[in-house]
């Protein structure tokens, strides 16, 4: 187990995904500086269950994704912009709050299923994802598409589609990529009924 900063957000990041963020709170500016200066292994994106991302007592999920900063810039509004890349799912075993308000967790990497080819019955999801990525542009246009990989397709769709946060979190916590695909497809059918 190792200790890494935790970044509670109202989103879910999967391995292989991208997450653009605007950083404005001092504790997170310091976290970014620490990540870049000391190469500490990034930070962990965890979904907020209750509260909000600026709340010191927000309740968050214990399954998240370790993220590494792959790019940064000073935005026109004066805020720091970063682009993070999802690495692997992790389990937050415990956490504590530092004096500056930053949460730091003891984390353990989760074992992943071996790569699985996308079954033919889910080809329409890969086509949908391809269209979405084409429309979104930067930074998603820089992703190297892996449209034949079941976990990659379901991860990107879950990140991009307007699903409830608890549903996205449940998909992140599911180990089997094929079960994630089945669940996602049924969620899409239910949530898009006229």
Image (spheres, helix red, strand yellow):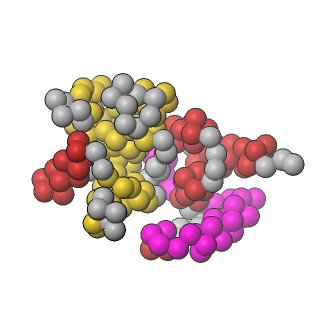
Characterize the magenta stretch by its predominant secondary structure: helix
Residue nearest the viewer, comparing 128 with 112: 128
Q: Is residue 172 left or right of residue 77?
A: right
Residue 109, by quadrant, is top left
Relative to 95, residue 90 above or below:
below
For the question of whether residue 75 can be seen, the reply is yes
**Membership of 33 in magenta stretch:** no
Residue 55, by quadrant, is top left
Residue nearest the viewer, comparing 179 with 160: 160
Q: Is residue 17 left or right of residue 96?
A: right
Position in image of residue 69 (x %, y %): 29, 58
Relative to 187, residue 57 above or below:
above
For the question of whether residue 182 can be seen, the reply is no
* Residue visible at 52% across and 73% down in the picture: 137
Position in image of residue 54 (x %, y %): 37, 36
* Residue visible at 57% across and 39% down in the picture: 165
Position in image of residue 14 (x %, y %): 47, 50
Residue farthest toward the left in the current orientation of the protein:
38
Position in image of residue 166 (x %, y %): 58, 35
The residue segment tinted magenta is: 112-140
Relative to 58, residue 32 above or below:
below
Q: Is residue 188 left or right of residue 105?
A: right
* Residue visible at 64% across and 45% down in the picture: 163
Residue farthest toward the right in the current orientation of the protein:
194
* Residue visible at 43% across and 41% down in the picture: 9
Residue nearest the viewer, comparing 99 with 41: 99
Relative to 105, residue 81 above or below:
below
């Amino acid at each position: 187990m190792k200790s890494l900063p935790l970044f509670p957000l109202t989103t879910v990041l999967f391995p292989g995904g991208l997450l653009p963020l605007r950083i404005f709170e001092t504790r997170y500016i310091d976290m970014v500086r620490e990540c870049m200066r000391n190469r500490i292994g990034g930070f962990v994106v965890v979904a907020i269950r209750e509260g909000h991302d600026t709340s010191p007592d927000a309740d968050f999920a214990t399954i998240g994704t370790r993220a590494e900063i792959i790019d940064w810039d000073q935005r026109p509004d004066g805020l720091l912009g970063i682009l993070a890349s999802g690495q692997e799912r992790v389990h937050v075993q415990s956490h504590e709050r530092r004096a500056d308000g930053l949460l730091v967790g003891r984390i353990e990497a989760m074992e992943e299923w071996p790569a699985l080819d996308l079954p033919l019955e889910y080809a329409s999801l890969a086509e949908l994802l391809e269209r979405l990525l084409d429309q979104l542009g930067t930074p998603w246009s820089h992703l190297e598409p892996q449209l034949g990989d079941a976990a990659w397709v379901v991860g990107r769709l879950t990140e991009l589609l307007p699903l409830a946060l608890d549903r996205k979190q449940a998909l992140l916590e599911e180990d089997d990529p094929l079960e994630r695909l089945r669940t996602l497809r049924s969620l899409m059918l239910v949530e898009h009924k006229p």
